[in-house]
Amino acid sequence: MSTISTPVEKAPATTRLVGRPDVNRKRMARLGWAFSAPALIIIAAVTIFPILYSVAMSLSNVTVTGSGISLNGFTWANYSLVLQNSTWHYALGFTVIYTFITVVVELILGTMIALVLERLAAGRGWMMALLLLPWSMITVINAELWGYIYEGTYGVATYLFGVQNILGTSTPAIIGLMIADIWKTTPFVAIIVLAGLVMLPGDIYEAAEVDGSSGWSTFWRITVPLLRPTLALAVLFRVLQAFGLFDLPFVLTSGGPGTSTTSLAILGYDAMFKNLAFGPGAAVAVTTALLVLLGCLISLRTFKVQVGKEGM
Amino acid sequence: MRRRKRAGWHRVINGINIATLVVVIFVAAPLYWLIASSFKTPSAMGAYPPQLFPNPISTANYHQAFVQYDFWIYFRNSLIVTLVATALVLIFGTLAGYALARTPMRGKFSTMVTLLMISLFPAIAVIAPLYTLLKDLGWLNSYQALIIPYTAFNLPFAIWILRNYMLGIPKEMEETGRIDGAGPLRTIWSIVLPMALPGVFTAGIFCFTACWTEFLMALTFNIANNYKTIPVGIATFGTAMEVPYGTIFAASVVAVVPIGILVFIFRKFVISGLTSGAVKG
Amino acid sequence: MAPVSMEKVNKVYENGFHAVKDMDLDIRDGEFMVLVGPSGCGKTTALRMVAGLEDITSGILRIGGKEVNDETPKERDIAMVFQNYALYPHMTVRENIGFALKLRKTPKAELKAKVNEAAEILGLTDWLDRKPGQLSGGQRQRVAMGRAIVRQPSVFLMDEPLSNLDAKLRVQMRAEVARIQRHLGVSTIYVTHDQVEAMTMGDRVTVMRSGVLQQVDAPQHLYDNPDNIFVAAFIGSPAMNLYDATVGEGARSVKVGSQTIDLPDSVRIKRPALASYAGKEVVVGMRPEHLPAEADDAAGPKLVGDVDLVEALGSELVVHFTVDAHRVLAEGAVDKDEAAAVKSGEGVARVAAKTPVKAGDRLTFAVDTDQMKFFDTQTGLSIRT
């Protein structure tokens, strides 16, 4: 049996090119840029240029005059000040540990909630709606609420658990802060995990059951690995968002007692707007942004397989 | 398998339902506390042991919030800023999303990645320069002071969502439109948008929530009473000495209700937005 | 109503892929021209270039005599029906059909009249206020056509519009589409990968392969006189049997495997060039219907084969047999899966329904030598004049 191909190659003739090739393409590309322009301009104006200006501020002697801020000369002083500052060290450590603990707890609790809800026959929609309420709540309101709960004299936590002066002592304050955050954010994690669970193919579980896998083993060997992409990206976003922790400690504890709940963002804010030390404050802000960027790049590289270039 | 006969209400009480009840209590208890406390009389707010159920039920806190404190003003400001920013985000986001989904621009990938990275920046990094800029423009304590940054910060996510939805629309729809003679704007309005509506709702509700709850920028830029938004207003009720929890909670309930209703109505879109955001990054 | 002509049209994509190579094609005014070929042959690309949805890399496209390379689809006054119909799901049938007219700011009364008229031609009048989601596949297809005809364009372009319909519906719709086209008299370019569709619908058929036009002809002519092996193998179902063969001395016979088939003078006379192939290898082609069964001892050119399988269709028997010869596959005419399944020396014949034959028999086929095709092994071209 042999295959024969009819000759397909014909020498391309030199033809008079009428019009321009790619006329359409170029037209559409220009249109694309025109359509994107408003969005890109606003984004650039509000994010890119200010960030560059922040970097500039962090590298200059900044003086505050009556009419505004002026940058004088190049200096590393702001950074050396910040990097040697014990409050900053604390803020960095606090932010990182706070993030770690809250995310882990939220992940565990959220997954547990999702597992429970997944089995729910009726009312799952209502439960999901209920879970959205803490997510949609203004963080400030959340802070005030828990402030009331933790209130030393008449808070219901004091009443129920007999703990005195929660917000006045460092460790209880930190824990109280975490609980408030966890309460608000766990439902968010639960929804993401639940949605991921619902999408898992059912026949894998039936196969596992036939193979004799127990509930716990099924969970660890099948559910968790399949959920990993969903969980990973949810964690990623949560962690990167946590570096900007501000609202909750600002309203609930004002960064205190002392500086025990001062996050990086609060430190930056206090430096700039309370102490008018814009140089160092900018250094704090820039380093925080760099940390976010670093975290982003690391995670992107780790999860490159999942994120990929889909649809690009 | 063991076969158990379960009578009517025994079926209701089982592990899952108990666990669900626990979850409901976990979520609802603080919410209950918020709402119930808002109806306590001002003196009962500080009662110890705390009143688990307001008795008598009083609307004094609400009265105070609106009459004594200018809550209506804060509510109005939040509404204006949020609605305008959301509208701008949806308009510019649709255009940019369409451009990134359909047109052969060079550097689409880098643009998308950059937009994504920008959306992760903590606001603290831009707050000082923006403050200076707004001050120079004389725009501190104004609506635009918040509308413009809110639009900028919410655009990346909206563009991402809208673009993904548009990619899912078969190209032939638009090609038919082109053949019929529709220009690009007409195509977006009559063909693409109606089919990408879920994406629009998703982007819209996320933007609304983000603007309604934003604190740091509102605190820094709009500290004048006439321009405060709800989060700032509530945070600055009272003084360092006296925190008027009653008033705060009354205001909070009023603040939570509209967004709660909106999120409930659009919950399908919120959930799809959260999951597509998580899965697709 | 306008003729369409392509002069040395090429399409090269950004990544270098040369999809359409130097295509010359003239479509007459009012003609139903079918572009057919395996997937990836460039037929859809060619269609989209006519539509204006793809840029033309080089060459000239003319519609109604006017060069339209730079014109937008709207300016070209064409209408297109897509494989997936591309109906706007949020609009009613009426709005779908009328959309183009609305864009052209047609006055309401006129718009309504035109939509009603198109609906009537297609039998959609009762469905005008439904949405596409409520319609069946066939109805949606008709709405897509309605959208095209209501514009009264110069050219209809159709990209495999029937591929998504089930077999029975497809046959029905083929007749419908052809009828409507004839009624309206609009030049039509119709793309399909199904050669049965091509043969039944086209005034003329253009066979394409790998971006190159193979042959343009009326269906019957294409069937009877293929220009090369590819066209011969692609058109006709079951496909033509092609074997490696050697031409005997003076072209008086041809040796297929171990068998020699005598060729009467008429064969040589009609194909003078064949004589120059004496002693050389050629590819010989015989269509299944030109191999009727014959008694072993009858006179005339014959071919003997071992029967593998007999399919009784009722009207005839399709006999799958083997001869000890090399079967030739035209590259691209069958897909890889089919190619892998073909055994060496395989052949197919269509014989009379009552022929007593079963698997395992040895059957003699009478070869209709007048209908035999000969192809040059190097160029694949048909040996004719």
Image (cartoon, coloured by chain):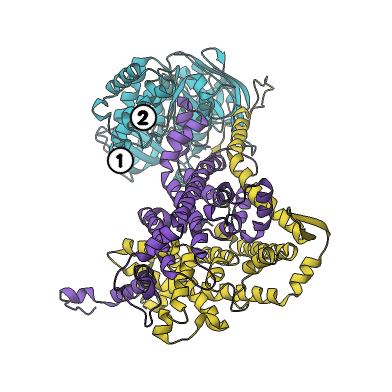
Q: Nearer the viewer, residue A69 or C106?
A: A69
* Quadrant assignment, res A13: top right
- Quarter of the image with the C terminus of chain B is bottom right
Q: Nearer the viewer, residue A160 or A25?
A: A160
> Mark 1 to mark 2: distance in Å?
47 Å
Q: Tell me where residue A136 appears, x and y as whole percent.
A: 44, 61
Q: Is residue C359 left or right of residue A8?
A: left
Q: What color was chain C assigned in the picture?
A: cyan
Report if residue A58 is visible in the image: yes
Q: Are marks 1 and 2 on the same chain?
A: yes
Disc assigned to residue C96: 2
Disc assigned to residue C323: none
Report if residue C229 is visible in the image: no
Q: Are marks 1 and 2 in contact (CB under 8 Å)?
A: no
Q: What color was chain B assigned in the picture?
A: purple
Chain in yellow in the render: A
* Quadrant assignment, res B173: top left
Which residue is found at the position 60% from the left and 40% from the top?
Answer: A38
- Which residue is label 1 attached to? C311
Element class at badge 1: strand
On what subunit does the disc labeled 2 rest? C
Please state which amino acid type lies under the numbered disc 2. Asn
Which residue is found at the position 63% from the left and 30% from the top?
Answer: A22
Which residue is found at the position 52% from the left and 52% from the top?
Answer: B226
